[in-house]
Image (tube, rainbow, N blue to C red):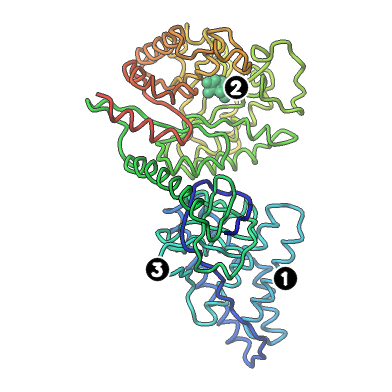
Amino acid sequence: MVICEGKKIFRGVAIGKIKYYTKKVNTVTRKRIEDEQVEFKRYEDARERTIEQLHDLYEKAVKEVGEMNAQIFEVHAMMLEDDDYNDSVSNMICNQKVNAEYAVATTGDNFSEMFANMDDEYFKARSVDVKDVSERVITILNGNDTDSDIGNEPVIIMAEDLAPSETVLMDKDKLLAFVTEKGSSNSHTAILARTMGIPAIIGIKIDESMDGKIGIVDGNTGKFIAEPDDETFEKYNKMLQEEKNQKELLNELKGKDNVTKSGQKIKLYANIGNVSDLALVLKNDAAGIGLFRSEFLYLEKNTFPTEDEQFMVYRQVAETMAGKKVIIRTLDIGADKQADYFNLEHEENPAMGYRAIRICLTRHDIFKTQLRAILRASMFGNISVMYPMIISLDEIMQIKSIMKEVKDELRSEGIPFKDIEEGIMIETPAAAMISDILAKEVDFFSIGTNDLTQYTLAIDRQNANLDSFYNPHHEAVLRFIELVVKNAHEAGIWAGICGELGADMGLTRRFLDMGLDELSVSPGCILPIRKVIRETE
Ligand code: PEP
Ligand code: MG
């Protein structure tokens, strides 16, 4: 038995035969050519065929792993449209009179080295991509089409490294897990493994002699075991069976309605805090994103994210969700979420302090930048916006006035945007109590039960010593929810929950009785809640 520790990329257990995977390497030899026009035409034809293939791959990947992850193939196609790349190939063919294969291989190597030497992590990672795309052109020049045949039986792929195109082309039914020696946790292959939900580990010393032997990939701990002893095999086999049972049960529910036996429907959306959560959103069949905590954009940086930086992220989320609702919650910084560059003063009681909408309504520059980015991104999907920590009608009026200014500015600059739905979070007792008044001014309510519980019960949600007192099932909290839903419906708007309580399956029945229209929960909770809903009378 051999046990190796690597870096876990995607959780889950896989047991099966190890397949030592080596790339089909194109051997390229330098040849002198006579007619450079003919040779360049060969390159142009191969380049065009490669671009076609990449577009096909993109389409395949969109279906399997979503728009965002598929984009890498569009990036590859763009590399072949790059003037510097093409000039380099053309110069070599025309000036040095070398064959197209050699010109492409050398150009690919040069560009790959150039990317590898860059400081920026994003560009560093492109080093593999430019090699991958050059290999693809050479394969076509050699008269072959590319594929990633891994045989007929399910296997654990062991490889030095994998290119995204190899990963996508592999037959998913035959792919139990990946183990690679190279690659980073942010490489596209790692991202694809996560999206496909395949257990994966990187940083494992690979060894050709393991080919054909039985292996175990434990993506939960990053352990890879070859030739397990009986006891280890049994232990993992049991774990695998448990995982399978759970997965099968949940997969049965994919694509099914969230409907009770008597026909009552409710929407199940997902909460996300980062674009990397999108894969899970798709995998778990969320009908939309009910809470996109935009703070991460601010917390990850040392300075304010620019309008363009935010726009790119919101656009990516909207496009990935492809027409499904995406509710972006505006900046909710303060209290436990601190970013030094905001220079917020120390407060005795930060949870009740200068935070969320209070910052936005006093720092219009920050707020307007975010609203501009959200509105611009609205053209790329089905975006809504919601505002956190609201306590009064006056705040809504102030937001409306700022929103109008932002829209007027965009119009005068000729920048298009859609008229998006605007909602508020109900997470203070004040907002819940006057929800009848607030409902007349907004398009929807999303109840933030984490804060609503904290402020209703006067219990600091951060204080672990108070856990036994923090009771979100407290009748006061539940009555607030009921009141908010009633007031929303009377005003003709919808109401949902986006706090943790929405995922409390002991309350699903009660939420249905209250008439909630939506529950937004962490992606992994969607299918279990669907199960409960479907079993409810
Ligand atoms: C809430 O308060 O319930 C909520 C969803 O917001 P957050 O947890 O981000 O404060
Ligand atoms: Mg909150």
Give the percent coordinates (x, y) of residue 248: 35, 44
Give the percent coordinates (x, y) of residue 341: 76, 29
Is the residue under label 3 in contact with that under label 2 (CB below 8 Å)? no
Of mark 2 and mark 1, the one earlier in the sequence is 1
Along the viewing direction, whichever of 251 and 315 lies nearer the viewer: 251
Q: Mark 3 highlights which residue? A: 152
Mark 2 or 1: the one toward you? 1
Q: Residue at x 52, y 72 (%)?
A: 48
Along the viewing direction, whichever of 463 and 391 lies nearer the viewer: 463
* Residue type (three-letter) at the residue carrying disc 2: Ile
Q: How many neighbours does mark 2 have within 10 angstroms: few (below 14), some (14-19), or many (20 or more)?
A: some
Give the percent coordinates (x, y) of residue 387: 55, 22
The quadrant of the picture occupied by the N terminus is bottom right
- Looking at the rendered structure, the secondary structure element under dot 2 is helix
In-image side of 164 versus 491 (left or right): right
Q: Residue at x 33, y 42 (%)?
A: 255
Along the viewing direction, whichever of 490 and 109 lies nearer the viewer: 109
Of mark 2 and mark 3, the one earlier in the sequence is 3
Q: Is residue 153 above or below residue 273?
A: below
Q: How many neighbours does mark 3 have within 10 angstroms: few (below 14), some (14-19), or many (20 or more)?
A: few
Q: Is mark 2 within 8 Å of ligand 2?
A: no
